[in-house]
Amino acid sequence: MKSRFSAAWIILFALVLIWGSSFILIKKGLESFPDNELGTLRIIITFLCLSPLALKKISSIPLKKLGLLALSGITGSGAPAFLFAFAETGLESSVTGILNSLTPLFTLVIGLALFGTRTRWYNIAGVFLGLTGAVGLLTVSGGGNFSFNLGFGIYVIIATVFYAFNANMIKRWLHDIDSITITSVSFFLMGIPAVIYLLVFTKFGQHSVHQPGALVGLGYIAILAVAGTAVALILYNKLIKMTSAVFASSVTYLMPVIAILWGMLDGEPFRLVYIVWINLIMAGVVLVNTRTLNLKGMWAAVFQKNTNI
């Protein structure tokens, strides 16, 4: 059990590193391709990367599960790929990070409302504590600016609702299918329609030939697709199965920390107040994953210690 707990935290921090860098990759990709092409390319490249795995796995999937896997692909990857790309045409990446931190909250609410998820008061407290820390960190790092364009922000909020529904769906309805199969087959089912859309309904051919820096932009999107989608989703789906949908989604709380580190590497100053918010985030994540909280035992230990002084 202890090794399983340690593995869950290792996966969580790996996801933080990968997804914490995704917003800058989207931003770079948008310099060469419009948002609809970026979203489609992200799906297609992931589809091509995972197709060999999908071809091995798909025959073992019961027919009634294929619909759920298609739904998982759309809510967990397909729709958010377009929503985030479009949102970043009108939002700063820091604001996108703030809104993305709503994912654990929606995961908790949807789990309670639609999936009958049981939780404890301190897990709920952890969700709000982590959200407070994430918002505080991003607000401070952004110079105290917490304003955003709701017209673009609503797309990120919709994406977080999709993420939340998908996380609960995997935990409840796809618990008997391994994470590699879920990820590879869901993209296999989305891949062909995405290829048709890109070639028939977009100007990708013109952009890829005439747009300056198109090859470099395609490289950024490829990194985003392979690392930030294919590999990350396999790890994320595995984390959901190992822990809970809420704990897995709490990765969004820690992603701003990576954004701060990227800023430091780019010459931005580090502020001591960051430590306060980072510790608040970590406390929230720990509470979310706490299964038993023995407050009586904690108080008894403190009281015993004080009486022995």
Image (cartoon, grey):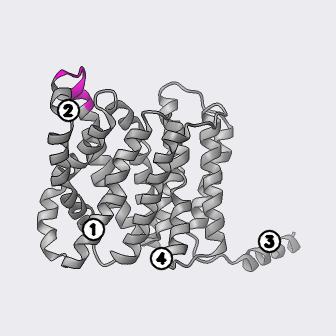
Which quarter of the figure is the N terminus placed in?
Answer: bottom left
Give the mark, 1 or 2, whose residue is nearer the N terminus. Answer: 1
Which picture quadrant has residue 66? bottom left
Residue 135 shown left or right of residue 65 in the figure: right
Give the mark, 3 or 4, whose residue is nearer the N terminus. Answer: 4
Looking at the rendered structure, the secondary structure element under dot 2 is loop
Give the mark, 3 or 2, whose residue is nearer the N terminus. Answer: 2
10, 86: nearer the viewer: 86
Is 213 inside the magenta-drawn segment? yes
Q: Amino acid at mark 2?
A: Lys
Q: Amino acid at mark 3?
A: Val
Give the mark, 1 or 4, whose residue is nearer the N terminus. Answer: 1
Question: Label 4 near label 1: C-beta < 8 Å?
Answer: no
Residue at left offset 75%, top offset 79%:
296
Image coordinates of residue 51 in percent, x first then y, are 14, 57
Residue under label 3, please give it. Answer: 302
46, 299: nearer the viewer: 46
Looking at the rendered structure, the secondary structure element under dot 3 is helix
Question: Label 2 near label 1: C-beta < 8 Å?
Answer: no
Residue 116 shown left or right of residue 14 in the figure: right
Looking at the rendered structure, the secondary structure element under dot 1 is helix
Q: State the mark number for residue 69.
A: 1
Q: Amino acid at mark 1?
A: Leu
The stretch of residues the image draws in magenta is: 210-217
